[in-house]
Image (cartoon, coloured by chain):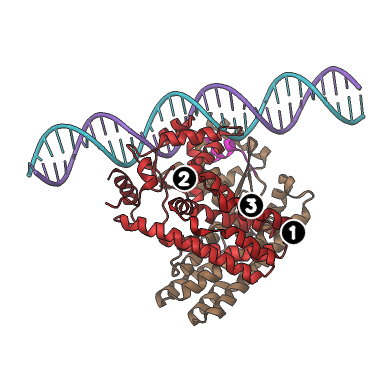
Chain colours: A brown, B red, C cyan, D purple
Amino acid sequence: MSEQIAEGARRASVGSGLNSDALQELAGKHQTGYRSVGVMVYDILKDAILTGTLPPGQKLRQETLAESIGVSRLPVRSALIQLEADGLVEFHERRGAVVKSLSADQAREVYDIRTLLEVEALRLSMAEMTPERIARLRELGRTADVEEEGADFVDARTEFYAELYDAAHRPVLWEMIEQLRLKVGRYVLGWRLVGGAEHGHSHEALVAAVEGGDASYAADVLRSHLERVRDAVLELLVAGEAGEAGGASAPGATAGSAGSAARG
Amino acid sequence: MSEQIAEGARRASVGSGLNSDALQELAGKHQTGYRSVGVMVYDILKDAILTGTLPPGQKLRQETLAESIGVSRLPVRSALIQLEADGLVEFHERRGAVVKSLSADQAREVYDIRTLLEVEALRLSMAEMTPERIARLRELGRTADVEEEGADFVDARTEFYAELYDAAHRPVLWEMIEQLRLKVGRYVLGWRLVGGAEHGHSHEALVAAVEGGDASYAADVLRSHLERVRDAVLELLVAGEAGEAGGASAPGATAGSAGSAARG
DNA sequence: GGCACTCATTCTGGATCCAAAAATCGGAAC
DNA sequence: GTTCCGATTTTTGGATCCAGAATGAGTGCC
């Protein structure tokens, strides 16, 4: 009986273009000790979106997601609402949720704002920098430069920046930065997978600049790092948008092109 | 015990601490033509928090809210999740939701970041300014300077800034600004109600500066406007924190002290 | 042969019901 | 008299069930 159900779920997911197996695998990794199912589902779906398992434009049917993860629709709905607030998912009233895709214009904006905020955060942070922090940063930077695998790649970079800006003691500012990083994270990962390995040792270089103590130089290093990543992301996005006919109105096409770009 | 703090919180926090009547009245105003109940509840609760009907520290019991508004608990939960993402509500796992209160430090941060972002938005916007926009701005600015009543006051100001920064065509930037404005909106209203009427014609002055065309002067006007409001908000907040024992580090204590202040 | 209308299917959003966790209150022991 | 422990009650979080809206297919009409 349960096999029939699983079989049904498989066919259903194939029809809607959802990678149910990969989602189940992600679910397995997360099924350890959560206080509530809702936040677990949230983490699973966030991971899935960030790593491209759920590509931009992917239609998100509550029933299918619930079956793949093995819970009821309710926590899925909770998670989707949170993801909408994060800007990763888009709700169409009475017509379901879709993984939001980022336009090139939006990406440009995100990086412009990130530059404004992160330069400020860096300035504040350097005023409070200590040798211990530098040491931790060097370690985290090395990991961030090396890490390849999907979710770990995202996490490593987040940890690095969290430590970098933590000395500033500006929780609201960090929250804003995190939010912006979340919007572009998927595409950075895509770039990395496509072969952006030549980015070298960006994070270690940044650490060196911070250790040097010259705030305006460090700001320049940060700015150029952000610009480099931005340009790579834009290249991906522009290519993706050129490959589409009507733009956001064709979700299936979006999912296809982004998916192939990530794999290629 | 300091009587001055709790003006709004006093009446609201009787018994279980919820002003059910005022909430019902708000619900009535909103009960017109919504596509889904969830977003209606979201709007009602947002209004309630922004206007002080649900004061910071207020415990939010799902059942009570649902009954007051006249819906089931489910859309209330949806709304609370969204409000949490907005930073207006705080969830304590398995222990319920509470209206988040803002610390003085957080308020300072918000205004620092707003200054960064809004000066940039103004700069971009002025480059695209037209006489038609100026005319609309003047009208909206006048309304924003005059409007007294809770929800209308908030709305009028939002419309003004939306129009001011719209010419910049930076939706992501505006979204960020809006988010920050949401965090401090309640306290600005509080200041206004306490008697900040001497703020004069801030918005009209800003419009004049924009019309003048001198970007750096306009930026100065905006900066000083933000500083003035910030200082007023901080005055309110510092007074409030002085009346409390613990501070922001103990959420339970914060909620509790708000309750006891109400009873005292 | 193409277009429009209708009906059935599907999926979202809401309500009710149930279980588990936490707070509170009372009692007992020290 | 105070403190600790346990039971009761309250409240959240999750599952199932139900109704209404949107989509798509099929048929009839132009």
- Residue B14 in the image, given as x and y percentages of width and height: 33, 38
The residue pinned by badge 2 equals B49
* Amino acid type, mark 1: Pro
The residue pinned by badge 3 equals B140
Q: Residue at 58% of width from left, 57% of height from top?
A: B176
Q: Residue at 60% of width from left, 72% of height from top?
A: A223
CB atoms of marks 2 and 1 within 8 Å: no
Residue segment shown in magenta = A59-73
Q: Nearer the viewer, mark 3 or mark 2?
A: 3
What chain does mark 1 sit on?
Answer: B
Q: Nearer the viewer, residue B171 or C20?
A: B171
What chain does mark 2 sit on?
Answer: B
Residue A130, placed above or below residue B31? below
Query: Between disc 2 and disc 1, whose residue precedes?
Result: 2
Residues behind callouts 3 and 1 on a single chain? yes
Q: Is residue A38 visible?
A: yes
The residues bearing labels 2 and 1 have C-alpha atoms spaced at a distance of 36 Å
Tell me which corner region of the image, top left, top right, bottom left or bottom right, holds residue A198: bottom right
CB atoms of marks 3 and 2 within 8 Å: no
Q: Nearer the viewer, residue A74 or B221?
A: B221
- Residue B84 in the image, given as x and y percentages of width and height: 48, 47
